[in-house]
Image (tube, rainbow, N blue to C red):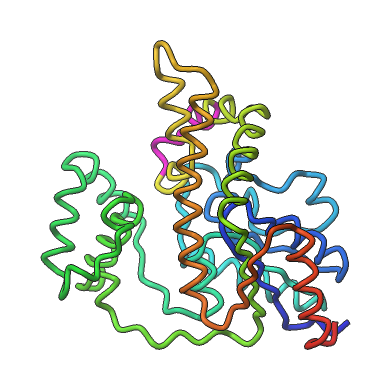
Amino acid sequence: MNSTGLCLAILGPTCSWKSEVALRLAEKYQGEIISCDSMQVYRGLDIGTAKPSLAERQRVPHHLLDCLDLHERYDAARFVREARRCLEDIWGRGRLALLVGGTGLYAKSLIYNLPLLPSDAALSRQLQQELADAGPAVLLARLENASANTALIPAEVRTNPRRLLRACEVLQLTGHPPWDLPRPEPTPDPAFRQFCLLPLFELLKQRIRRRTAAMLSAGWLEEAARAEAAGLSRSPTARQALGYSELLAYLSEPSPPGLAVLAETLSNRTIRYARRQYTWFRHQHPGAQQIIINSEEQALSYILDNITTSLSL
């Protein structure tokens, strides 16, 4: 098997069989998995981030899991630095690397060698305090005033506090919002073979609802309470982990509704997130092979056929 310098990128929306397919590929080809997930890096967020189990990690080496405490910051620049270090280590030992996850910006930054935007931890904390004191409208107005074309402001910047803060941080450090900075045409690194798993969306919705119920049964509420006691709501990035704010709101209610209502709320939130991921992976990864699937076996078969006919695996 000639896998030195090769990375299979298994990407796609949440709940799209990425982890299962990657695990089987890694076992077959003695590979190692690098997590491309902005929240699985945190200790204590296990159930809600669908983190690979200890048993799965014993079957195949995993990287970039359980690396940070909740109070630590994580962003695309830090991910790229750590992922490159992991790739060099894996390739240096003659192993196949698999990049697996659904955090699209992280994956694109690594695969397409996007210029890393500057960051400053002290400035980030200052902006977080400003957001808490003055609200998002003040920060958003600052970005609008600085933008050459306000139509270019991404929708997520207007709706996601983490994206808003990051854009303001870049503005203050460079004098320009991120979307006004010059960017070279993205060209994928030839070391990566990209496969985007895109389940039929109705099937994906069913899988999300089943997994949400299973997470709640496995103790997701209790995990959220422990994370909050450890400072989740005060964290710079971990507090954006999907579903935890809804769980904490539920726990704070004097007379919360039944778990079925909570499960519906969490499922709908996750489905909206998956739809945004679906759109991202359809349009933001030129050169990736998009696989419309209805089963784990279908995805695995497609990837195996592709890599065994075009690579010396």
154, 122: nearer the viewer: 154
Is 71 left, or right, of 219 in this rendering? left
Q: Position of residue 247 (x, y in %)?
A: 48, 29
What residue is shown at x 56% (from left), y 26% (from top)? 221
Is 81 left, or right, of 115 in this rendering? right
* Magenta extent: 226-235
Q: Quadrant of the C terminus?
A: bottom right
Q: Position of residue 218 (x, y in %)?
A: 68, 29
What residue is shown at x 64% (from left), y 45% (from top)? 207
69 up-or-down from 76: above or below: above
Name the outermost residue toward the top: 255
Q: Position of residue 40 (x, y in %)?
A: 59, 49
**How many discs mark residues in the rendered view?**
0
Residue 153 figure quarter:
bottom left
Q: Quadrant of the N terminus?
A: bottom right
64 up-or-down from 210: above or below: below
Residue 98 figure quarter:
bottom right
Q: Position of residue 21 (x, y in %)?
A: 75, 61
What residue is shown at x 78% (from left), y 66% (from top)? 300
Is 76 left, or right, of 167 in this rendering? right
Q: Is residue 238 magenta?
A: no
